[in-house]
Image (tube, helix red, strand yellow):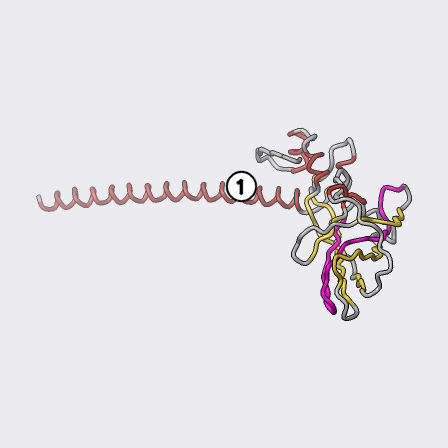
Amino acid sequence: MTSLIDVVIATGIFFVSIALTMSFVLSYYSNFQSVLEDSDLRTSAANVNNIFFGGKGVPEDWETRDTTPSRIGLVNDLFRMPVILATTNATDLNNVTLNFTANFDQGCLNRTRENTIRIYNGTNSEFPFTLFNRSFCPGNAFLRSADISINMTMPALSARPMFIYFSPESGINGSNSTYGVIPFPRNVSNYTATIYPIETLKTISPSKLRALRNLTYSQIALTLGSNTRFQLEVDVP
């Protein structure tokens, strides 16, 4: 009798163990599948991010063409020209118009549209300016060089950093109309303008974003090379 009871108890423990083991296996498999799906989504998201924000696309000017690009890129070049303005004697400059020459694109690589030019001071505030004596690259679409007039107030024997930004982007509104025309300076000599080499940065291209809105779902999916379904919303002013 005792032996039969032991068998029953042992059998019960065996089935309970099997049930717990199966529950653990199924739970592990379910979690593993969830991890795999999450990993796949992360991989797809990383691939899409690299495609969209890893370069200009193929061809680089795909947004100007009527054909489907081989690769969609939403990045474009943004250039920055650092300038240091400094007084040269013990005389303060109080709301004085200064001028210096900026060579935006001496090699005419078509990287400067006039309307994209912005100037910021050392605290990232936009600085009013007016361009004079402009010279253009062949075709007159891209600026080569210009004299820049600005109003400055600086204590004697001090210096102010400025940063001139520009790009080849089309469809960017100019900023000069918002603060009027600054006249060309006359007879101001107690300052220097030191211009440093142009730096190349990267930025999201408004023209490429606008062109992206004109592509169909199938065209975008084809360039992504992925079976993952997606939803894309583009809002460009």
User: Within 10 angstroms of label 1, few (less than 14), some, or many (20 or more) residues?
Assistant: few
Q: Which residue position is annotated with label 1?
A: 41
- In this rendering, is residue 86 above or below 164? below
Residue 197 lies, in percent from the top left, at 79, 60
Q: Residue at x 70, y 35 (%)?
A: 210
SS for callout 1: helix
Q: Residue at x 77, y 50 (%)?
A: 129
Residue 44 lies, in percent from the top left, at 58, 42
Q: Residue at x 70, y 45 (%)?
A: 75
Q: Nearer the viewer, residue 124 or 71?
A: 124
- In this rendering, is residue 96 above or below 91? above
- In this rendering, is residue 170 above or below 99? above
Q: Residue furthest left?
A: 1
Compared across the picture, whether 4 is left or right of 32 comes to: left
Magenta residues: mostly which secondary structure? strand
Indicate the quadrant containing the C terminus: top left, top right, bottom left or bottom right: top right
Q: Nearer the viewer, residue 96 or 228?
A: 96
Residue range highlighted in magenta: 140-166
Q: Residue furthest right?
A: 138
- In this rendering, is residue 227 above or below 162? above
Q: Quadrant of residue 151?
A: bottom right
Compared across the picture, whether 27 is left or right of 13 comes to: right
Q: Quadrant of residue 7?
A: top left
Indicate the quadrant containing the N terminus: top left, top right, bottom left or bottom right: top left
Q: Count all numbered tags in the image, as a single digit.
A: 1
What amino acid does circle 1 point to?
Answer: Leu
Q: Residue at x 41, y 43 (%)?
A: 31
Residue 222 lies, in percent from the top left, at 67, 34
Q: Nearer the viewer, residue 180 or 2?
A: 180
Q: Does the magenta portion include 222? A: no
Residue 221 lies, in percent from the top left, at 64, 33
Q: Nearer the viewer, residue 227 or 142?
A: 142
